[in-house]
Image (tube, coloured by chain):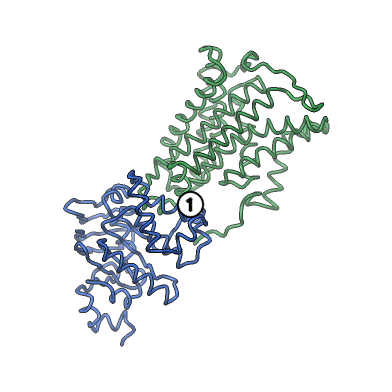
């Protein structure tokens, strides 16, 4: 479904991604783990069109999307839940969700998706008219995910959904990610919490200083000494 | 009674400031730029209205709409040509560019039509004095206030209820997150300039009717004062610009009403200094820490 092929991405003079390749197949949860600064967020931003790769290609459903405008990419069915949630704090929960459906014109479908999101996150329905800035961190994460789902994506990019959340909430968010996946959305998940990420993913890639150093099925990586040492706390 | 008349005058004057201040504040809200050419867009609006009335012989409403449309286009052109290429440049570069655009508009206008002033025809909106509860109020004041209020309500509707308004608020809060929603940030910024400039154009026509005399450098002082009004209300905050504008107009009228008319223009800048010392975020602003 998505094929990233040897991309190089620069931030000014900093070579953030060095020939990164990865593949996401339809229906999968693929996770990308790695330390801070490994380039995980950069990779997601490049896929969603916020950054342009210098070399290499990104092919989505058979056509190149490398360097295309972000709105074109959203329209083609890739939604990105950014790191740190980035909800529109001065707007209501409802308005945030409406913005998620910004490019859609099918009113009925949008209403249907409102209902779906509220079913997934009943808490958001309770807080529908509340400003997003007044929500707790967990609720904001739910809103950020809900907002991305309002675009009815085929591929959902999630950047550190567990960041700053209590363990119980992390579990809940991961359960919901699995639910979203089971209902037919392919997922590319970036996480520092490698343990949780590998527990729900089908396949995984390990990113270190801008390069893919390891890849395989989630269970292979869970068993790998290298991953255990570096990302699973050595046991 | 005298006081109430002064208040009515002040509110009319203030509603002109408010209309201009809205453009400053909307543009600042979305691109963090003080568009110092905004006062000159107001001047162009005034002249477009004037020529529409004197040469095309149209009435108030068509003249107003024509001025608003021309200024909207002008605002978008300014943004595309002067500011867009500098979107990632240092703020001081953009600020200097804004001053340059301001001078350019002023002196191109003088080059094209000369520096001589014009007088808005008094037939456009005949002034009658109405007596309400013993207070004499000019019909023009009420009309100005009414027009401004309609425009402000319309703006609130656009910003809060329409798709483009929601896009504007989203971009102003977090442009990158807005792009992830599929919002076209460039077009949204263009629309913001268009709407803000249209309001300035409307203010130009209203100003012409109220003060009669218009000339190519007329935008400087009202522009600066509207900027003060925007800062007073809290730059970037739309209701703040409305209240700041009205408040500034009332204060000016009261200052002249008390017999200190020579201090009238000074009042605005005293307010600017006071607000910068005591409440730099403005009346409606929250003191926010810069995000890291």
Q: Is residue A5 above or below residue B217?
A: below
Look at the image and tell me in which quarter the C terminus of chain A lies: bottom left
Examine the image and state in which quarter residue B54 appears.
top right
B264 to the left or right of A222 = right
Q: Can residue B228 be seen in this view?
A: no
Relative image position of residue B228 (x, y in whole percent): 64, 41
**Residue drawn 64% across and 45% down?**
B233
Instruction: Specify the subunit that label 1 lies on.
Output: B
**Residue drawn 61% across and 57% down?**
B287
Relative image position of residue B286 (x, y in whole percent): 61, 55
B29 to the left or right of A68 = right
Q: What element carries label 1?
A: helix
Q: Is residue B162 above or below residue A92?
A: above
Q: Residues within 10 Å of mark 1 (few under 14, many from 20)?
A: some
Relative image position of residue B141 (x, y in whole percent): 69, 26
Look at the image and tell me in which quarter the N terminus of chain A lies: bottom left
Examine the image and state in which quarter residue A230 appears.
bottom left
Q: Is residue B131 above or below residue A83?
A: above
Question: In this view of the protein, which residue sits in the foreground, A103 or B9?
Answer: A103
- Specify the chain shown as blue: A
B58 to the left or right of B146 = left
B100 to the left or right of A32 = right
Relative image position of residue B30 (x, y in whole percent): 49, 45
- Specify the chain shown as green: B
């Amino acid at each position: 479904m998505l094929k990233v092929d040897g991309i190089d991405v620069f931030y000014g003079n900093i070579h953030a991604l060095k020939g990164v390749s990865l593949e996401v197949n339809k229906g999968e949860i693929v996770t990308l783990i790695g330390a801070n600064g490994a380039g995980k967020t950069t990779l997601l931003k490049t896929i969603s069109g916020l950054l342009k790769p210098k070399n290499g290609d990104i092919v989505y459903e058979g056509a190149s999307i490398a360097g295309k405008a972000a709105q074109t990419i959203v329209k083609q069915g890739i939604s990105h839940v950014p790191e740190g949630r980035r909800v529109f704090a001065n707007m209501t929960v409802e308005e945030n969700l409406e913005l998620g459906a910004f490019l859609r014109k099918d009113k009925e479908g949008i209403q249907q998706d409102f209902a779906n999101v509220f079913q997934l996150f009943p808490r958001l329905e309770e807080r529908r008219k509340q400003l997003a800035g007044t929500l707790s961190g967990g609720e904001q994460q739910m809103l950020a995910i809900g907002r991305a789902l309002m675009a009815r994506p085929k591929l959902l990019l999630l950047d550190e959904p567990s960041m700053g959340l209590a363990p119980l909430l992390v579990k809940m968010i991961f359960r919901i990610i699995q639910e979203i996946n089971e209902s037919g959305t392919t997922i590319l998940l970036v996480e520092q919490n490698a343990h949780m990420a590998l527990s729900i993913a089908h396949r995984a890639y390990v990113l270190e200083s801008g390069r893919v150093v390891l890849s395989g099925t989630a269970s292979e990586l869970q068993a790998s000494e290298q991953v255990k040492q570096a990302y699973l706390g050595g046991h | 009674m005298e006081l109430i008349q002064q208040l009515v005058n002040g509110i009319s004057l203030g509603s002109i400031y408010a209309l201009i201040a809205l453009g400053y504040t909307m543009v600042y809200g979305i691109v963090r730029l003080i568009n110092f050419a905004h006062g000159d867009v107001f001047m162009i609006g005034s002249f477009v209205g004037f020529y529409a009335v004197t040469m095309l012989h149209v009435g108030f409403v068509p003249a107003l709409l024509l001025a608003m449309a021309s200024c909207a286009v002008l605002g978008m052109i300014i943004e595309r040509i002067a500011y867009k290429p500098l979107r990632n440049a240092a703020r001081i570069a953009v600020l200097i560019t804004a001053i340059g655009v301001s001078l350019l508009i002023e002196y191109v206008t003088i080059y094209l039509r000369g520096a001589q002033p014009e007088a808005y025809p008094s037939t456009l909106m005949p002034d009658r004095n109405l007596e309400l509860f013993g207070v004499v109020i000019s019909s023009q004041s009420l009309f100005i206030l009414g027009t401004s209020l309609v425009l402000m309500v319309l703006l609130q509707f656009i910003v809060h209820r329409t798709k483009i308004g929601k896009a504007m608020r989203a971009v102003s809060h977090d442009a990158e997150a807005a792009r992830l929603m599929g919002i076209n940030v460039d077009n949204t910024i263009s629309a913001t300039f268009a709407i803000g400039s249209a309001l300035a154009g409307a203010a130009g026509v209203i100003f012409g009717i109220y003060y009669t005399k218009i000339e190519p450098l007329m935008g400087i002082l009202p522009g600066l004062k509207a900027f003060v009004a925007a800062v007073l209300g809290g730059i970037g905050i739309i209701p703040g610009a409305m209240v700041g504008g009205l408040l500034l107009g009332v204060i000016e009228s009261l200052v002249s009403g008390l017999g200190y008319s020579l201090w009238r223009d000074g009042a605005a800048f005293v307010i600017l200094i006071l607000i910068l010392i005591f409440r730099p975020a403005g009346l409606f602003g929250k003191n926010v820490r810069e995000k890291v």
